[in-house]
Amino acid sequence: MSDFFADIPKLTYAPDAEGLAFRHYNPDEMVMGKRMEDQLRFACAYWHSFAWPGGDPFGGQTFDRPWFGDTMADARLKADVAFEMFDLLGVPFFCFHDVDIRPEGESFAESRRNFEEIVDIFAAKMETSKTRLLWGTANLFSNRRFMSGAATNPDPDVFAWSAATVKLCMDATHRLGGENYVLWGGREGYETLLNTDLSRELDQMGRFLSMVVDYKHKIGFPGTILIEPKPQEPTKHQYDYDVATVYGNLKRFGLENEVKVNIEQGHAILAGHSFEHEIALANALGVFGSIDMNRNDYQSGWDTDQFPNNVPEVALAYYEILKGGGFGTGGTNFDAKLRRQSLDPEDLVAAHAGAMDVCARGLKAAARMLEDDALEAPRRARYSGWEDPQAQAMLTSDLETIAARVEAEGLDPQPRSGRQEILENVVNRYV
Amino acid sequence: MSDFFADIPKLTYAPDAEGLAFRHYNPDEMVMGKRMEDQLRFACAYWHSFAWPGGDPFGGQTFDRPWFGDTMADARLKADVAFEMFDLLGVPFFCFHDVDIRPEGESFAESRRNFEEIVDIFAAKMETSKTRLLWGTANLFSNRRFMSGAATNPDPDVFAWSAATVKLCMDATHRLGGENYVLWGGREGYETLLNTDLSRELDQMGRFLSMVVDYKHKIGFPGTILIEPKPQEPTKHQYDYDVATVYGNLKRFGLENEVKVNIEQGHAILAGHSFEHEIALANALGVFGSIDMNRNDYQSGWDTDQFPNNVPEVALAYYEILKGGGFGTGGTNFDAKLRRQSLDPEDLVAAHAGAMDVCARGLKAAARMLEDDALEAPRRARYSGWEDPQAQAMLTSDLETIAARVEAEGLDPQPRSGRQEILENVVNRYV
Amino acid sequence: MSDFFADIPKLTYAPDAEGLAFRHYNPDEMVMGKRMEDQLRFACAYWHSFAWPGGDPFGGQTFDRPWFGDTMADARLKADVAFEMFDLLGVPFFCFHDVDIRPEGESFAESRRNFEEIVDIFAAKMETSKTRLLWGTANLFSNRRFMSGAATNPDPDVFAWSAATVKLCMDATHRLGGENYVLWGGREGYETLLNTDLSRELDQMGRFLSMVVDYKHKIGFPGTILIEPKPQEPTKHQYDYDVATVYGNLKRFGLENEVKVNIEQGHAILAGHSFEHEIALANALGVFGSIDMNRNDYQSGWDTDQFPNNVPEVALAYYEILKGGGFGTGGTNFDAKLRRQSLDPEDLVAAHAGAMDVCARGLKAAARMLEDDALEAPRRARYSGWEDPQAQAMLTSDLETIAARVEAEGLDPQPRSGRQEILENVVNRYV
Amino acid sequence: MSDFFADIPKLTYAPDAEGLAFRHYNPDEMVMGKRMEDQLRFACAYWHSFAWPGGDPFGGQTFDRPWFGDTMADARLKADVAFEMFDLLGVPFFCFHDVDIRPEGESFAESRRNFEEIVDIFAAKMETSKTRLLWGTANLFSNRRFMSGAATNPDPDVFAWSAATVKLCMDATHRLGGENYVLWGGREGYETLLNTDLSRELDQMGRFLSMVVDYKHKIGFPGTILIEPKPQEPTKHQYDYDVATVYGNLKRFGLENEVKVNIEQGHAILAGHSFEHEIALANALGVFGSIDMNRNDYQSGWDTDQFPNNVPEVALAYYEILKGGGFGTGGTNFDAKLRRQSLDPEDLVAAHAGAMDVCARGLKAAARMLEDDALEAPRRARYSGWEDPQAQAMLTSDLETIAARVEAEGLDPQPRSGRQEILENVVNRYV
């Protein structure tokens, strides 16, 4: 045991506790027929919690962690602390990138060996830990070699490097029993159209994704391939802009039945959508996979990756998830980082605990709304005119026939209230 | 002749004129093998120029036009003035909605008769005018019956009304020799997800669009069906969010070879894109159709529909259009309205004239950049590594093979400058 | 009694009611030493509730109210219905503009007489109603004469008209016992700098405001003069941008002790601030007056004026208000409008009732946080270093002395955690 | 001589050159009575050009500069290269922070000694170089000690450290003949109101600024103290939000005659303003000082610090500057960084050269508009009604008198066109 979390005991459900505890997250409580833990499927993100130094564009490292450094010993200590936190929180899952867990080597091969050594350590730890792998992924954006993209790079050698890296990370994810494999194209986009061959880059991206899907089948990986949409940042424009854009790309490459989306609240906001919109749309298009439950600040035009703290908003997200049948292989990942002034180990644990409670409250409110038919009954009523056979027939008719009927019957449709405020009041009775 | 533009003479190309004239727009000048008029294909928008009263959410009518009113006489005067302006400006095209040109009747049938009477007048005027119809469209968003959508309305009777209206407008467009038919789904979206069946509404929208395409073929309309993307406003979310979203919807309904997009600069901005991005993407996806050349104010979070006035920005838009081969049936429509304080007839003419000059400057700069290979040569050089057979082979390879090569060859790709500032300097030598 | 709210009974506090009732707003409950009603001081806005037809920039009237029209009979019916709603809701206050309550006349004098007749009716109604006037104001932005501003108009006659209108509205406000008089400069700003003399317009605005203050003293109006900041919309730039800007203007004209601010959540958001920021800043600068408790949609770049529905956000606003000592003459005005699809009388009542409950929940949470010292204790601790006499002395020292001490004492300040997530968790225990 | 710019010759004005040259910037050309160099007063920013490694929140260093490192030898090489670039470009000015030019020491004293050694080197270089110091400044935001602010820090020792640092930088600026001293409060603001004592922090900031002004007078520094407004980033809210906010703070602390503003285009955009607005407002309030001529990307919600490339926009900024009388001690600083993919020395030189040409074009267009009275004549005409003695008298009158006149004279002001589009056309004849 490291002594990083020395004074912090394992958290339990204790609604009336004074100190660090779960006041709402009760893993064994049943919610819509499943244990709460199995509905929420929480995951911690290795990168923000253990690899991020606290920098921003105007200042460098603020965190002072004993494992910061470039050696394998540092990487092993980091792994120890990570699994200690997973245990403290009792989270069922974690997520990681290759570069989070190992030092960069002098060559691809050396980096690979470093990576595989830590993956071995993970495998050993997971034998005694309850924590499983929600998803693995490759960081194809931080190293300077990726500055102009990974799969979409003008240099084919970077495409090759990226392909080799994804293969490596898929292998590790498969070995560790990961339930999904995620691709976030942090530099798959452009800084300026002036130097970009948009059409060629989209084709490269499609080809790369097809190879990923082929490899999944080849190795028999039973998990889900997920793409994480984001509209911009670090690039000016990212090709996986939002759920609708990803869907269009998938359709174009014939991959809409092979790949789903991992939706992040903060990325939804940057793209001009609500989180619940992106979830609802993914469900409508049949590509909903998983979520990153970390919010952006509405006032800040960049990705702030904050822990969720607004129960009414979180409730609407889980409402759409539950309405769609809940998570399959997906889960609730906190791709969230501490504010750079939150220096203490306690901050790290408390931030996750608070977020887990916020999600638990949101989930329970969402479940009650569904169980009470509180929103679905009025929704069905609003569209009930479409149950009429003549209305249904119209959908397989044609413009001329319909136009003739409009005049023949002297149709004069009258608007009916959309009752938005009343429905908002309904939600407020649950949150 | 009305006397609305009494003192304003027909505009001509006169670079050194003091008063109202074209200083850059020279219809007969050849640009990349076509007359400038045939490259730019300007259109005036009937609605903003002749039907908009100058209101905004905090104030009502400011314009005082002799044709404002609800009678057929008003509508006929409006048509006279409109064609007088088309003639003053020498624009080759115009565009209109049904409600712009006729008073609303007591019933669908009466509105239809009013509409058809004005369409007859248009047809007569067009026999002696050079102005043709770039596109017709139906206004399915202003009347209160459309408050909850048109094709996506919870009330099937509104769907029917909308279908009948589109049929009517397509018939008129066909009769007037229109080169395109446009659908802008101003209320195809939602104010709140709480009362919305997203999946059902998307299906209704797809079905409606399929009927439109079927009807086009049935009547032998040779023009192009265009969808105009917009992310929001008036609704909180519009289903035709941006080019990528429209493409995904078309693919989903199997209509990607039947329908193209009409891209508006202001809508691109609202969706978080540059205008040139949306054009380039539409070209890459094979769905580029036409443009609405009216800008938004970058500081205002709503659609301001201003006349274009920034030559460097306009040049980048035409660059993408020319690079893609120029307009087919599409053109440059000014879906632009005067500021509500611009009360005078002269303002209306001068605004169009200034915009036409801005576009002419942009087009000429774009053409020179293409002719000089000023941007394409460096672009080809940037991707030249992909011309290598080994690079091409990789695109049909697989992750394992590529990964083996990365280690075997000890690949270590080194980044090369993207030269953004140098390319921006190149552009500035042309604009 | 009109029959507009025919089936809707007077609302009462009934936490377990099924139908329309207050579940949280309990006027007589004591919160921090005052009745809840006296802490919240709710007001209904006449304009949105009774004068707004449901239009937006892409569509016209959706509401169908029996009093819509231009006659004095319409205006009287509107007044009847308004006071019926005030009574149903039991709100202690209302607010109005001149143009909300009377038809426009042919001349200033006729408009004035119309206005005064309705003010008489209000006075009579208020003798038997509990509802008082929170504030009166003048609409100096809707009529086309104000299209280029009111006090800042290039035409001195519009300045004169505006001055006469404000005098009239101040007289009415005084007569009706109003507790404040508000100025919102809806067109005090510009559409383009190209035609604007910024310096001159700011001087006109300052001079106008000084006259308002002088007139207040002359007539012995005991209420507060309030300015309502907004950054833009309808204009591209409004001079009363935000609280900080208004403060600077007041200081410039020597009015910082005469005028306070009425802060609207939606306007704060448009200006890039949180609502609680604007309240906290106004308290810090000594100019906090009153609030408009209506939210904007974070995704929409225009003023949506929605009823509040997010308790955690509302709680933070009331926290700053209570921390500053609560309202003086100010209150909680709902400058909120129904969504244009919310057509029914029930929508209007339910929207207000839901909003009142949201505010009541927020207020109670805020009060408990203050009473528990839950946020103030850690805040004091964070700054406790400044209690040291040497630290205090530094504030009256000089750079040289301090610099000498830094080297002499070898200062090496170490950062301490800002504990943001822990404080957010604290808030979540209360909301 | 280092060999960093080995193949790049000194740039000259050569309008028809093929390679690196000035096509529009001609230092000796007279513009409104001054040499162009003396109107524009260009400065290079040491930090972005020589100290920034190319990182962003999702990736680290991309630039590979021979002087990157922590030794004094590195710092000396950096200084050599910097002055070589100043010489290549022929810029008359540069700007720097303390941390740009020296390695951090183990203590304040060691950092000071490192700093002073490089300042000595600067002084020596400046004896033979034409390049002078536009302004010096202190970096009080990058080191982790400043994570919670500098003057506004909860820890008084950080206030002390900041005071000592500013003294040191003011001394160096004075010694090097700097024409201004700038304060940018990068962390003077907050991440969350929950842990912030807003009122106390504003007082600390005011007190700190007063000390700076006192010290300026004490040492006889003849330059101008400038504050650089920015609304947010890195913090959620910065106290020097925009020009209007800074003005209010200065008035509050009685410093409005002692301190002016350094306005950055990118910061203006982030605050919801146009660049020309901020300049015009600063002129109206008497606090205009200097500019940072670097643009933001309108699509990116963070500070991108790009070199200017849009002539029409730049022209409007210089128009306001020239209209206000031109620069005094201020100038045109390029607080601009290369895109992180622009790796080559040529990129650095070309980016500055292109920006200088853009500014030269903008300046010349602005000067011609002023000389032709092209915008000022219509502006005067628009407000000419205020020249009437009765109008002027009204400004010293009162509401009652004015109201009486409105009715007595039956005023009925009629709106007149604001002619925005016509004025935009006028501008387009010059740019």
Image (spheres, coloured by chain):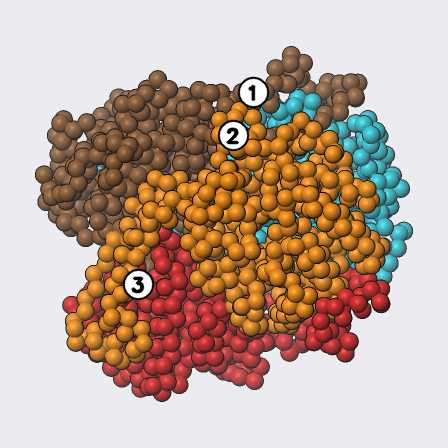
Chain colours: A brown, B cyan, C orange, D red
Asked if both marks, 3 and 1, belong to the same chain, the answer given is no
Report x, y in % for residue A53.
Answer: 24, 51
Who's the residue at 63% across and 76% down the image?
D370
Q: As drawn, is C345 to the left or to the right of A118?
A: right
The answer to the question of whether label 1 and label 2 lie on touching residues, with beta carbons closer than 8 A, is: no
Spatial CA distance of label 2 from label 3 is 48 Å
Tag 2: Cα neighbours inside 10 Å, few (<14), some, or many (≥20)? some
Residue B357 circle label:
none
Asked if both marks, 2 and 3, belong to the same chain, the answer given is no
In front of the other: A157 or A429: A429
Q: Secondary structure at mark 1?
A: helix
The answer to the question of whether label 2 and label 3 lie on touching residues, with beta carbons closer than 8 A, is: no
Q: Nearer the viewer, mark 2 or mark 3?
A: 2
Report x, y in % for residue C225.
Answer: 60, 61
> What amino acid type should be assigned to the residue bearing mark 1?
Arg
The quadrant of the picture occupied by the C terminus of chain A is top left
Return the chain for callout 1: A
> What amino acid type should be assigned to the residue bearing mark 3?
Asn
Q: Which residue is mark 3?
A: D153
Q: Which residue is mark 2?
A: C14
Who's the residue at 68% across and 19% down the image?
A398
Q: Which residue is mark 1?
A: A380
Report x, y in % for residue A47.
Answer: 25, 42
Return the chain for callout 2: C
Is there any visible trace of residue C108 in the rendered image? yes
Return the chain for callout 3: D
> What amino acid type should be assigned to the residue bearing mark 2?
Ala
